[in-house]
Amino acid sequence: MKRRTLIASTAAVIAMGTGAFAAAHAEKTKVGFVYVGPVGDGGWTYEHDQGRLAVEAEFGDAVETVFVESVPEGPDAERVITQMALDGADLIFTTSFGFMDPTVNVAAKFPDVKFEHATGYKQADNVSVYSARFYEGRAIQGHIAGQITESNIIGYIASFPIPEVIRGINSAYLHAKEVNPDVEFKIVWAYTWFDPAKEAEAATVLIEQGADVVLQHTDSTAPQAAAQAAGNVYTFGQASDMAEYAPMPRVSSIIDDWAPYYIARTQAVMDGTWESTSTWDGIGPGMVGIGEITDAVPAEVKASAEAMRDAIADGSYHPFTGPINRQDGSVWLAEGEIADDGTLAGMNFYVEGIEGEIPQ
Amino acid sequence: MIVLEKREAPSRLWAWGSPVMAVLLTMVLGGLLFAALGQNSITVIRTIFLDPLFSEFAWFYRPQILIKGAPLVLIAIGLSFGFRAGVWNIGAEGQYIVGAICGAGVALALYPMDARWLIFPSMVLAGALGGWAWAMIPGLLRVRFGTNEILVSLMLVYVAEQLLAAMALGAMRNPEGMGFPGSRNLSQYPSAANLELISGSGMHWGVVAALITVIFAYVTLSRHVFGFHVRLAGQAPRAAKFAGVNPARMVLICMGLSGALAGAAGLFEVAGPAGQISIDFNVGYGFTAIIVAFLGRLHPIGIMAAGALMALTYIGGGIAQSSLGLPAAAINLLQGMLLFNLLAVDVFTTYRIRMLRKEVS
């Protein structure tokens, strides 16, 4: 592993930053993280940063972690990633879909540095990709939401019309419909991952249209605050537990848990066993967590939701099991057929019953 | 008692001294801010302002200043004409987006044709025309119906953002992108790519265009009758009328010029550093350029210096984040302080401080 010698002052500065003077000359493994949002977003970036802290806690003085937050997706990302590689990072996690091309470009220039790109699909010899099967959590959300709604209208704050988000909508809808045939989804596209003002506005619009459950694929707690203000509206924590809004309006949550993966990959770099891989883990391996279902949900609903969670975890149930038709009525999955990962990864259609069109 | 007294004429010394004062004041106040965050102020200021230029990896950071600064300078020069003449185009960000969409549209329509001599110049032309056309909307509305160009041009930024999202998701989506949003990568299409002219130098066509624009603007403002009219229209609108300046034409020319330059900046960005039309292609150059224009005293050479300084704070800010663990918000604060301090120090250009002693009778 090529380590660059840092000029004395820089080394001192870094050592000061981590408060570890004594180990400044030891062969530390340096792990960099590039975040799309602020670490205090309480959602997506917050959870990645929790993963970073877990890496520090696990390896102590043997690692040094650095991060840059709120990096715009585009040329700035390329500069920030390059800068980390230059500064001697051995392993760099880039944690947003939009960092894909910049990551691949920089990786080509630094063959000795290992890169890990979240939620993308472009792999290289020194670029791994990883993501979580959030749709498994969406199935449980839909299962709960379909039963607790009284207006039969479920609001959904969608971020961008990319496969990951569409997959979540489909999964939630299928499982809400399964327990409540009258259920209807109203979807608002916010075109943002994190924008409290826009998210609050979207939540308010949905509530005014009669939604009494609001699901979200955006990262702030603004929808929870809007639901609390409206009263009697249920929400689910997204990316992070958002437990501060429990037991109402937050009745459960999908939690991203990147810590085990980050620790394992850092370990692999230390051992020299790192290889380019494509990882897509769900509830089973613990990458997706289901936050505690509160008492605002009836006990029997809670029990069946937990049973579904366990069935998904042990592999006996797949949220996309046929028969499922596409929105236009054509057959997607026959009776008993299970969706393949390729179709799921590029999902660009609604399932039958969802109204409206995916923005084009 | 301390009073502010209006000067008979604006001080020339302060006119050029205040940006320097503002930068120094920002360093001092920024230093205090960083100290409050538990950092060593000197180290942070050095990391932000000097490390990009003189550190071990300066060979990488110096070209980045050109890449980051070029669109800022290009847009700010265009804006400075309007700002001098009292035409307030606040929507350069939107014109930047539309320019990028139009220019990229030409390339994507002709893909994979191999004819750089035709495609790249057409893209630049389309980019400038796109920005020009977008700026003509507030321009014509103001001339024809007397609407406020500040509001209209600003609102059109949000329209342009929606258009950008629609393009990234629909018409311009990469057919080989597995359904993900974003266009083909133009920087990987040789006939359309705006690559570095000399490898490792950061010099791409946008940087060249920015430098040419600076010279062109300098000559126009100081030697050409149009430059004289622009200054006259801003300083003495009535006198300008007597001198034969048509105010409607002035609005259209200033809006069009700034729009075209913003559009060209967008094109150079999308064909080079950014590479593709994506949902969040724009990162605020059009708004930051307003700060750059004022920090540079609306003067071409000043704008060039201000653009470089602003680029420096972005790059140095990134370094400070990753090597010192400084939060991103602290960097944004520092940049915001720069404009705030400039406005504050600017008071001394037109006013002076006088100490009045209370008279005892």
Image (tube, rainbow, N blue to C red):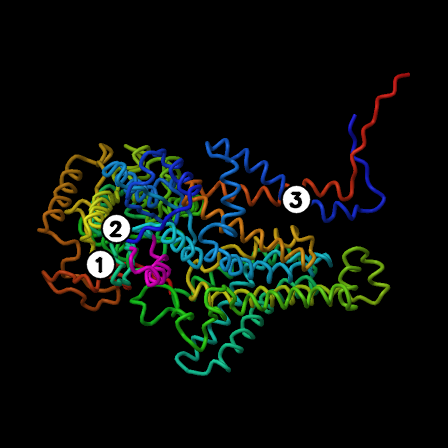
Q: Which residue is mark 1?
A: A276
In the rendered image, the vertical position of residue A81 relative to residue B215, given as above or below: above
| Foreground residue among A170 and B231 | B231
* Contact (Cβ within 8 Å) of mark 1 with mark 2: no
Image quadrant where residue A343 sits: bottom left
Magenta-drawn stretch contains B71: no
Q: Amino acid at mark 1?
A: Ser
* CA gap, disc 1 and disc 3: 50 Å
Q: Which residue is mark 3?
A: B342
Q: Residue A103 location, x and y as percent?
A: 34, 58
Q: Which residue is mark 2?
A: A183
Return the chain for callout 3: B
The verdict on a common chain for dots 1 and 2 is yes
Q: Secondary structure at mark 3?
A: helix
Q: Which residues are magenta?
A: A96-113
Return the chain for callout 1: A
Q: Amino acid at mark 2?
A: Val
Left or right of B348 on screen, residue A248: left
Return the chain for callout 2: A
Mark nearer the viewer, 1 or 2: 1
Q: Secondary structure at mark 1?
A: loop
Q: Residue A317 location, x and y as percent?
A: 11, 52
Identify the residue at image location x=67%, y=66%: B215
* CA gap, disc 1 and disc 2: 43 Å
Total numbered labels placed on residues in the image: 3
Left or right of A161 on screen, residue B96: right
Q: Residue A264 location, x and y as percent?
A: 20, 46
Does residue A237 appear in this view? Answer: no
